[in-house]
């Protein structure tokens, strides 16, 4: 491992890091933006069991994400609406797949 002996000046130290500010989320993505690790691991496991192609269909996304309703503390119907809306947002070429 190489370690530089050169010291970083104050002007260099203050010029490092994030320069453009925080990322902006689409409003529909906001509920999904700060999920705990256990929720991410849960949907990752379901994703790996369901997704078998190069894209994800709407019904597959619903099956992957539906259990997040408990994490988000919303009804099943409300969760289905959120999933449909986010699917429409991500399906930019309108081919019925998030790819």
Image (tube, rainbow, N blue to C red):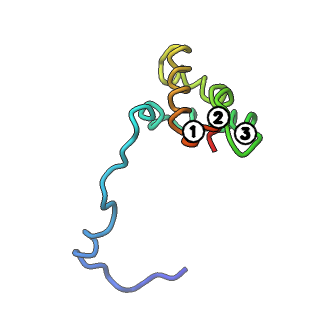
- The residue beneath circle 1 is 91
Q: Which quarter of the rendering shows the N terminus?
A: bottom right
Q: Label 2 crowding class (10 Å Cα cut-off): few <14, some 14-19, many 20+? A: some
| Front in this rendered view, residue 83 or 3 | 83
Question: Vertically, is 18 above or below 32?
Answer: below
**Residue 15 spot, x, y in % from top left:** 27, 70
**Residue pictured at 68% horizontal, 36% vertical:** 47
| Front in this rendered view, residue 96 or 60 | 96
Quadrant location of residue 91?
Answer: top right
- Among the two numbered marks 2 and 3 on one chain, the one whose residue lies closer to the N terminus: 3
Res 75 label: none
From mark 2 to mark 3, how far is it between C-alphas? 19 Å
From mark 2 to mark 1, how far is it between C-alphas? 7 Å
Q: Which quarter of the rendering shows the C terminus?
A: top right
- The residue beneath circle 3 is 48
- Among the two numbered marks 2 and 1 on one chain, the one whose residue lies closer to the N terminus: 1
**Residue 41 spot, x, y in % from top left:** 62, 38
Q: Disc 2 vs disc 1: Cβ atoms closer than 8 Å?
A: yes
**Residue pictured at 42% horizontal, 84% vertical:** 4
Q: Label 1 crowding class (10 Å Cα cut-off): few <14, some 14-19, many 20+? A: some
- The residue beneath circle 2 is 96
From mark 1 to mark 3, how far is it between C-alphas? 20 Å
Comparing marks 2 and 3, which lies closer to the viewer? Answer: 2
Q: Which type of secondary structure does the marked residue at label 2 adopt?
A: loop
């Amino acid at each position: 491992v190489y370690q530089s002996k050169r010291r970083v000046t104050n002007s260099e130290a203050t010029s490092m890091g994030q320069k453009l500010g925080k990322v902006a989320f689409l409003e529909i993505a906001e509920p999904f933006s700060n999920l705990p690790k256990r929720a991410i691991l849960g949907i990752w496991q379901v994703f790996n069991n369901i997704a078998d192609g190069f894209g994800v269909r709407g019904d597959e996304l619903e099956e992957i994400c539906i259990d997040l309703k408990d994490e988000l503390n919303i009804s099943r119907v409300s969760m289905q609406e959120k999933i449909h809306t986010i699917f429409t947002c991500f399906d930019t070429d309108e081919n019925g797949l998030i790819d």
